[in-house]
Amino acid sequence: MKRCILLVLIFLISVSVLNAFNTGKSVLFADSYMLRAKGVEAAYWNPANLKQVKGIDFWLPIMNLGISVNNNSLDLDTYNYVVSQDFLDDEDKIKILNKIDGSLRSAVEGNISIIGFAFNNISFSSSLHLTGRLAVSERFVDLLLYGNTDSLYVFDKSTTDISGLSYADFTFGMGNFIIPFIPEPIPKIRAGFSVSALVGVGDANTQEFNGYFNSSMEGLSLQQDISLHTGIGGYGQKVMLGLASNVTPQLEVGLTLDNLFGKITWPFTTEARNISITADDVYASNIDEEFYDYTSETVDIDTYSTELPPELRLGALYSMKRANVSVDYLQGFKSSINNSNIGRISMAAQVLPLKFLPIGMGVCFGNSIYPWRVSYSIGLHTSTGEIGFGVQSIKQLFPSYKSKGLSIGSYIKVNI
Amino acid sequence: MKKYYFILITALVFLGACEVKKPTMPSWSVKLNIPLINDFFYVSDLVDSVNIVLNEDNILTVTANGEATTNEFGNLPFNPNINLTGIPLIGSSYDFYIPFTDPTGTVEIAYAELAEGVFESRLRNVDPNVDQISLVFHDIYLPNSNQNLVISSDNFDNWVTTNLDGMHLGTPNTNEIITQLHISIQVNSTLPAGTQVATLDFRSDSMISLGEFRGGLHNYPVNLNDSDSSINIDYPHGLDQTLTLEEASLQLTLQNYIGFGAEFSGQLKATNAAGVSRIIDILDENGNNFQIQPALQDGPVVTNFNLYDNITELLQLMPTTIQVIGGCFEIESDNNIGSVKPTDTMHLDYLINAPLIFTLHEHEIVINEEHEFSIPEDNRERIQKNALSASLNMQIQNMLPIGASAKLFLSNTPNIDIHNPGTYSFLKQVEIHSFNQNPGFQDVELELTKDELDLFASEQVYMRWSFSFEETGSPVTIHASSGDYIHLKGMISAEILIEED
């Protein structure tokens, strides 16, 4: 029994490190994937396109995954440079700090399929998601590299933060409903929906992070207040509505509204860890064991919810015989760990030099908090299944030493 | 499954073609600024409320007070030195007078309790017809009575001693000085009046002790007890070695419980730490002894005197001991009538004040308090191993009108003796300008060598300050308000090497 629990935990932890895209395959197209998702995936991207022509579209467990590790500042080149140095001089320090714009933000995002199948215009699926974010103020890095050369260092949640969210979805989707009473010559519009039951694995979010460090002739003072809320075990839901239409035989457009009624409630183990450190007017000559006040307490807190704010996505896909191109625009209505209220555009293209060999490329232009990225992918498609993988370079055209992060995605589906 | 991952990873590596170097931590240096001290050294901290006080103008003042008291006045000795012989006694009733004065002229009695004393009398050549002869002393009264002393005797030809203890001479509150004793003779005989009935010999040549006394006293000395009058002065921080005072005063407060005026004479003897003594006469501004008024009936008379001139000379010695020597109240009633009881005293309080208006000498004042701070073990190791260089940055504000040189002594052992280099590891010296030269903060940077820095790798570090004030040459006044201080702020700036353990 213990072994089973351990395996489940390892599994959850491992999948926790892999998650946060809607599906793993979208990595291959830099998120321009709304109208490309078919079969099971359509329930996560646009359920209007849930239309299995024949057989059952089956998602192999774990094989469909996406992982992204990225940050906004440092790249492999910088890393290699730093670790290859014996001593960092001022020039090196400047080089490092110049790469950080206010805050060193890193994120781990992941998604992994558990199981999924689609037939006719219906799908059932389940996948796991994880998002982890860490932000460290540039002032911390400055302190680390130079010491306390300035008299005052202020830290707050805008530049220093940590949060994480992991949950599993169980999604039911139906689509390919033709909206009636659409007058000619307006093309037919398909509609669909998906409903997801969410099972929260864990949540951690920084509620408060305020502090300062002051060191001058007037003494050393510091204050740091941290409040971290955690929840383990939760439940929730979300709904996605989708529309799609083939404007012309080659051009398809679509719209989705995701995360309707989206939230995860954490009713079980919820705690607040409150840490406070205070010291005032400390001098080396008057220092004693009580020169600072440190309090740390963990208290049970009431049930709370993690909101999943609604997102609007618009997309277009133009298909030709051996190629297609797409463009997506995503606009969140509120910021959260999973979304941003700043819109972003992504584009992708896929060519089939051979009928069974799709080669793709995507680019997401990003925004102020979501770094731009470029994807490259290759796959193998047959009448009985699909396999493929892709890689995404963050803030660099090709995966290289200069990339600020890397995402990988893979997919395996079979048609039974 | 494994094959799938192999293909995936191989493809990623191929696509990425990136080399990820083995993570090894480089070293780098950081500058740490650690506030070290923020101390105010107030002039008012010199106030010990004993020998260093503040006067009403907030001027730091050296003060010392002492007191001396005479012994109780006691019984007044009086010897009329009477020795009369052959006084003819005429019967049957006869009055005559015997002189009764102090041959030295010191004591004039108007009234006195006779605490101790005797008269001696002898009747000779008594006529055989005489049975008894009585002598009535009209000025002498029996104890607790208004009856006169009567000496009756039938013991002829022998000396008769009459004990006077408890009797009193004269009547209370009288202002009449008794210069002779009025004596009446009463003879019990059959002889006719006007006949000489006997011859009287009378002696009062031994000391008579007078208790409560009223009358006149002339040039009668009452001495102070010198042994009570000595006072010690403790100067904080060796202040006595540092300065020469420019002015001082002596306030004498005399409380006279004796109903006679007096003239006080005496000397002040001051001795400093080096054993050098100086003596001055206690005289008024005209060079005369101080005159003291007699006590009143309802209590003592308090008389205050202030001395200035000679006292400065005395205090410039920066004495550690001051004593009144040869103190004496010489009673002189002139033509007035005074009174005194045996229990009466005279009391002297004296207060020496020397506001710190002084000329400063170069001398080191050592701050008694020794700072101690602990260096955590981790930091000790880091300092030893990783500290590259350091400096001590200081900001100093001197609100005093005198410049100084401040020395900071550091050691890893307690009880730093600034005069013994073996008790400290090193010292740092900074020059502090006077307030007049620089009223703001003065920035000072002191570089620390690696050896000096290694001191902070000790478990405990001790720190002591000393100040040497500049020779002023001319008098300066030191106030001790809340605005008179030296403010020292210090910060250690150290360059530390960060490296992997």
Image (cartoon, rainbow, N blue to C red):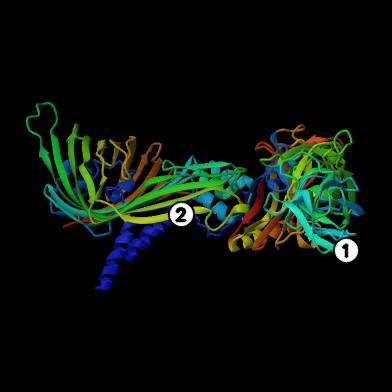
Check the picture and name the quadrant holding the C terminus of chain B.
bottom right
- Given this view, does label 2 or label 1 mark the residue nearer the observer? 1
What residue is rendered at 43% in x and 51% in y?
A276
Q: Which residue, given by chain and number where applicable, does mark 2 sit on? A: A294
| Image quadrant assignment for residue A34 | top left
What is the distance, in whole Å, between disc 2 and disc 1 at their CAs? 112 Å
Dot 1: element:
loop
- The disc numbered 1 marks a residue on which chain? B
Specify the farthest residue to the left: A181
Are tags 2 and 1 found on a single chain? no
Are circles 2 and 1 on residues that touch, CB within 8 Å? Answer: no
Amino acid found under the numbered disc labelled 1: Asp
Viewer-proximal residue among B83 and B475: B83
Q: Is residue A131 visible?
A: no
Label 2 neighbour load within 10 Å: few <14, some 14-19, many 20+: few
**Residue situated in front as seen by the camera: B140 or B40:** B140
Report which quarter residue A84 is drawn in: bottom right
Kind of residue indicated by mark 2 = Tyr
Q: Position of residue A245 (x, y in %)?
A: 17, 35
Q: Is residue B226 above or below residue B396?
A: below
In this picture, residue B351 sits left or right of residue A387: right
Helix or strand or loop: what does disc 2 sit on?
Answer: strand
Q: Nearer the viewer, residue B44 or B3?
A: B44
- Quadrant in the picture for the N terminus of chain B: bottom left
Give the label on residue B157, or none: 1
The answer to whether residue A152 is left or right of residue B429 is left
Residue B438 at what x, y percent from top left? 74, 33
Can residue A26 be seen at all in this image of the molecule? Answer: yes
Q: Residue A273: x and y, percent?
A: 36, 54
Q: Given the image, what chain letter belongs to the residue carrying mark 2?
A: A
